Amino acid sequence: MEKEITINGLTFVPYISRDEIREQVSRVAGEIRRDLSGCEPVFLCVLNGSFIFAADLIREVGIDDCHVCFVRYSSYEGMNSSGKIKQLIGLTEELEGKDVVIVEDIVDTGLTASNLMDDLRRRRPRSLRFATLLHKPECTKTGFIPDYVAFSIHPRFIVGYGLDLDGKARNLPDIYVIKEETEDR
């Protein structure tokens, strides 16, 4: 893991290593596998940030008869949540009677997650679960609690492993935090 990186003039330092990520992805995958054994789940990946987490998670879950589809919601502008949810790319899959697992990169205010869950409940899936790489419980405005959480963290702006700053740093295998925000997770 690199020591420091600079993106858009901001200095970031290591926060969560690829080994820690791998370990928690494996744990979450085991929980999903246990809960959906014998099912043909639909993994609904929320773009753009979840793509790396989703790929690693779905492979690790190891259910051969799964389906994977994508939706794109956005509420971030730069480093802050705008508080406004915009559906950018809609869902075309039939979900009625299916076991759906939403895969998201991060839940902080819970607005996007709550909105997405409400939208999907109207499609009458048999079950609906939510998996996230990162959860910021202190930031929630909705009381939303994901079913599967790899890491609960304090409010920090982070990049890497799919998370970006203005489209940059998604490709980093580790997660970084702004240098000034290096207190406890």
Image: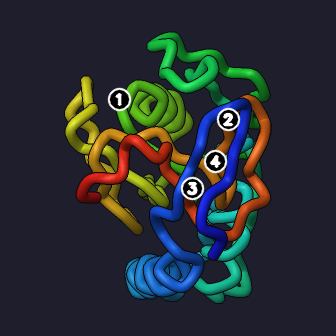
Q: CA distance from mark 2 to mark 3?
A: 20 Å
Is 89 left, or right, of 130 in this rendering? right
Q: CA distance from mark 4 to mark 1?
A: 16 Å
Q: CA distance from mark 3 to mark 4?
A: 14 Å
Q: Which residue is mark 2?
A: 165
> Residue 80: x percent and y percent?
50, 21
Residue drawn at x 28%, y 58% as measured from the top left: 185
Identify the mark at residue 118; answer none if there is no mark.
Answer: none
Please tell me whether residue 34 is drawn above or below residue 84 in the rendered image. Answer: below
The residue carrying pointer 2 sits among few (fewer than 14), some (14 to 19) or many (20 or more) residues within 10 Å by Cα, namely: some
Q: Nearer the viewer, residue 171 or 184?
A: 184
Is 81 left, or right, of 96 in this rendering? left
Which element is circle 2 on?
loop
Quarter residue 150 falls in: bottom left
Q: Are circles 4 and 2 on residues that touch, CB within 8 Å?
A: no
Residue 8 visible to an observer of this rendering? yes
Looking at the rendered image, the disc whose residue lies closer to the viewer, 2 or 3, is: 2
Instruction: Report how many numbered discs are placed on residues in the image.
Output: 4
> Residue 58: x percent and y percent?
66, 75
Identify the mark at residue 103; answer none if there is no mark.
Answer: 3
Give the amino acid type for the residue marked by disc 1 in the picture: Thr
Q: Nearer the viewer, residue 115 or 138?
A: 138
Counting residues from the start of the chain, the first of labels 1 and 2 encountered is 1
Q: Which residue is mark 1?
A: 109
Q: Which residue is mark 4?
A: 163
Which element is circle 1 on?
loop
> Residue 149: x percent and y percent?
37, 63
Give the amino acid type for the residue marked by disc 4 in the picture: Leu
